[in-house]
Amino acid sequence: NRKQRDAKQEQLKAFKNSNESQSLSTDQGTKLPNTSESLTAGERGPTLMEDFHFREKMTHFDHERIPERVVHARGFGVHGVFKPYESLSSLTSASFLQDPNVETPVFVRFSTVVGSRGSADTVRDVRGFATKFFTEDGNFDLVGNNMPVFFIQDAIKFPDVVHAIKPEPDNEIPQASAAHDTFWDWVVHNQESAHMIMWLLSDRGIPRSFRMMEGFGVHSFRLVNQQGQAHFVKFHWKPLLGVHSLTWDEAQKIAGKNPDFHRQDLWDAINNGEYPEFELGIQVIEEGQEHQFDFDILDPTKIWPEEQVPVQKVGKMTLNRNQDNFFAETEQAAFHIGNIVPGIDFTNDPLLQGRLFSYLDTQLLRLGGPNFHEIPINRPITPVHNNQRDGFHRMTINQGKVAYSPNGIAHNNPQPVSKEQQGFEHYEEKVEGKKVRKRSASFNDHFSQATLFYNSLSEHEKRHLFKAFHFEVGNVKDPAIKQHVVEMFNHVSHELAKKIADGVGVKAPQPLNEEMTQQKSNALSQAQTVFTPKTR
Ligand code: HEM
């Protein structure tokens, strides 16, 4: 079904300026003979205030930057299409997952997290993998990363982890790197980060290409079918080219020789017709099985081991068109996990809950007010109809004298839509409890899955990991922080902790006592091979 795909492309076309040569003009349409010389009083005299063209051109230039994203500032966007392999109607009413003949347009933005807009592509970092599906029922944004877990369990810590990993505030050093005191000081004070640190310091932290990374929604979401039945779900993207990484030496050299390595690779591949493909995978857990795991399925520092909950491949995304304009599309794209469609819903994952606030909030600032959904790249392909109006940069011309509901005057009131007609209804989850600032004890095991990860690595992957620790922690200046890192990762693996200690010049730790080891071994019995990149 080409129609839907065309719907987004047709919509974008209406905003593109023509490539044909046209008369030079001001922004007001006044035609001009010259844009290279200012209006002056005499050929060698001062520039005149009345030079409206000079003033307009310069003012526009002076205002052409917008704030970069507070995280994920450096990114690269690309268009594509998504098709499910078969109907998922037993699990979800989401329209784009019903019919294998329906192609849904998508826009994907890949990114690094820490560096500024101009930083290098191949640094060691998490990669963002954000997908906007332009579905018949509105926009669905799957705003994921290339690692399946996260640094923190509770969103309230996000400003802290970001402040710790970003350049230090006194001298803005180091750019785009975790190799400094504030980050590792934060890590040792937040031991829930152990699992994510293992992923970050593994080869996953230096991908070979955006085309060769997995993507993960990280959180537990819900799929809800037309009958209102819900299942917990985790989303995955599996690249058909397999998962490939650089070595650290390659990554550093490439960062110097071609800081645009990843965006160039993606741009060239698409221009050459080598379209990157990713299969959408889902892991599904029945509502009734929520408490049957030795980790909390709402904890974003945990994976659902694939041996226990297999990944089903349910569809394929093909990235097949480069953007026309980096600013208009990549920079102005606004992804938000709160952009949701009927058939998909949230869970009480405390990281997810906080993200629901943060994205819209930051975009109100970054994109200058409440109308950024009207920017071409962000517009849904479905009609938008409500009584929201006005505000900076409003483009819609709302008609009529009434902007409130209910009313007895207007004839074109926005009509409520029932669930049967794909109106969004929140899943009716039962919630009760006392108001507390206290995380459930079911989130307390910070090390078992980190150990699982370590044990799953091959010998050369372990060597890469040791080197990464030596580089990252070796750059820390305060020996006390280095010592704390060694003690923390002793809970993951004594072998690893000894290697770190050797490489960064601090004391090797004592092995953990039996009681601590026993606590972990219960969880370890569950799965062993989850973390090895699977290539096809
Ligand atoms: C971007 C906040 C966790 C993936 C952003 C932005 C903010 C933010 C403020 C900038 C958005 C913009 O300016 O448009 C948060 C908070 C988090 C969190 C508060 C936790 C409490 C995560 C997690 C993931 C993630 C767990 C992955 C699953 C992304 C991606 C982008 C992004 C991919 C870039 C989107 C784009 O390409 O424009 N985040 N984030 N974030 N975040 Fe998060």
Image: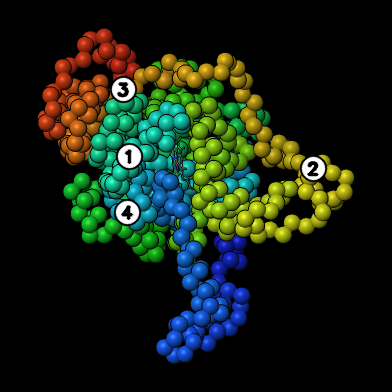
Q: Which residue does the numbered mark 4 point to in the structure image?
A: 119
Could you say which quadrant of the image residue 230 lies in? top right
Inter-mark Cα distance, 4 to 1: 15 Å
Q: Which residue is mark 2?
A: 405
**Of helix, strand and loop, which one carries label 1?**
helix
Question: Which residue occupies 27% across, 33% down?
Answer: 184
Does residue 284 appear in the picture of this structure?
A: no
- N-terminal of the pair, mark 2 or mark 1, is 1
Give the CA separation, mark 1 to mark 3.
21 Å
Of tags 1 and 3, the one toward the viewer is 1
User: Could you tell which of marks 4 and 3 lies nearer the N-terminus?
Assistant: 4
Q: Is residue 200 left or right of residue 228?
A: left
The correct choice, above or below, for 178 with respect to 325 in the image is: above
Real-space CA distance between mark 2 and mark 1, rounded to the nearest whole angstrom: 47 Å
Q: CA distance from mark 4 to mark 3?
A: 32 Å
Q: Residue at x 20, y 46 (%)?
A: 248
| SS for dot 4 | loop
At 48% from the left and 85% from the top, the residue drawn is 40
Mark 2–mark 3 distance (CA, rounded to whole Å): 53 Å
- Mark 2 or 3: in front is 2
The secondary element bearing badge 2 is classed as loop
Residue 159's place in the image compared with 49, above or below, is: above
What residue does disc 1 label?
165
Number of the label disc, if any, that sits on residue 447: 3
Residue kind at label 3, given as amino acid type? Phe
187 sits left or right of 57 in the view: left
